[in-house]
Image (cartoon, rainbow, N blue to C red):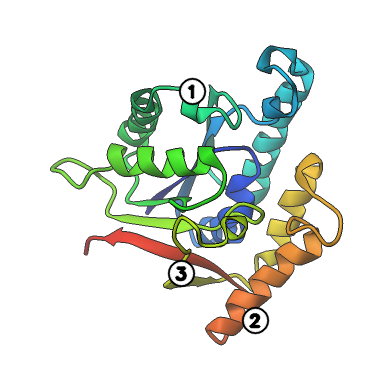
Amino acid sequence: MKVIVIASHPDDEVLGCGATISRLAKEGNDIYIAILGEGITSRYPKREDANKKLIKDLKKKAENVVELLGAKELFHSDFPDNRFDTVPLLDVIKKIEEWIDKIKPEILFTHHANDLNIDHAITHRAVLTATRPIKGCSVKEVYTFEILSSTEWAFGEFGSFNPNVFFEIKDTIEVKIKAMEIYESEVRGFPHPRYLEAIKNIGRRWGNVVGLEYAEAFETVRRIV
């Protein structure tokens, strides 16, 4: 199977489904990771003030993560970090359509619609538009993931994350942790949700929900069988 993960920022692919990526790759599937945003520039007063070397280094880290997780290829775009709402939605949709047309994946993972982060919400909307279930669309299954410090920090004000698909990740949870360690600038100390032990605990929590040791949770948007 061909699987694509479409994420807003470098590290979202790991937080959202890093262990599942690794598992699916080990099982012989072709996994592609596509990242829409440049990352980190929102940490500066003006986008043009951002350290270009740090942006380049972040892209290199994303490439290292792809290799670690066993994904086949990484695709990048450079939409402005935490400023997707300044870009015409059509531009985001067109970029996703370009990737979909090239890869022709059957399965897609992306952000939940109701995340606090505006880029995540726009990515979700753009993905659904780019993968409309019309004749010729290769995508038959669409799943959304949670992102720690974004999904739960919306506190359900825009709608809740209600997972109904769970991937067992007992054998790949440590790969997810190692991948997050590559993105060391995105990891936080205790008690932040992106504390490494907290990330692992979320895997335990979802595992406990469905009688597993570790799991990653997803909400089904659609599944055509």
Q: Is residue 186 above or below residue 77?
A: below
Disc 2 marks which amino acid?
Glu
Spatial CA span between label 2 and label 3: 17 Å
The picture quadrant where one finds residue 196 is bottom right
Give the foreground label among 2 and 3. Answer: 3
Residue 7 showing in the rendered view: no
The x and y percentages for residue 90 are 33, 25
The residue tagged 1 is 86
Question: What residue lies at 74% left-to-right and 50% top-to-bottom?
Answer: 180
Disc 1 marks which amino acid?
Thr
The picture quadrant where one finds residue 211 is bottom right
Q: Is residue 23 above or below residue 185?
A: below
Q: Earlier in the sequence, mark 2 or mark 3?
A: 3
Q: In what quadrant of the picture does the C terminus appear?
A: bottom left
CB atoms at circles 1 and 2 under 8 Å apart? no
Q: Residues within 10 Å of mark 2 (few under 14, many from 20)?
A: some
The x and y percentages for residue 10 are 63, 38
Spatial CA span between label 3 and label 1: 30 Å
The x and y percentages for residue 140 are 27, 54
Q: Residue furthest top?
A: 48
Seen in the image, is 57 located left or right of residue 25?
Answer: right
Query: Front-most of 133 and 62?
Result: 133
The residue tagged 2 is 213
Seen in the image, is 30 located left or right of residue 80?
Answer: left
Q: What label sits on residue 163 in the rendered view?
A: 3
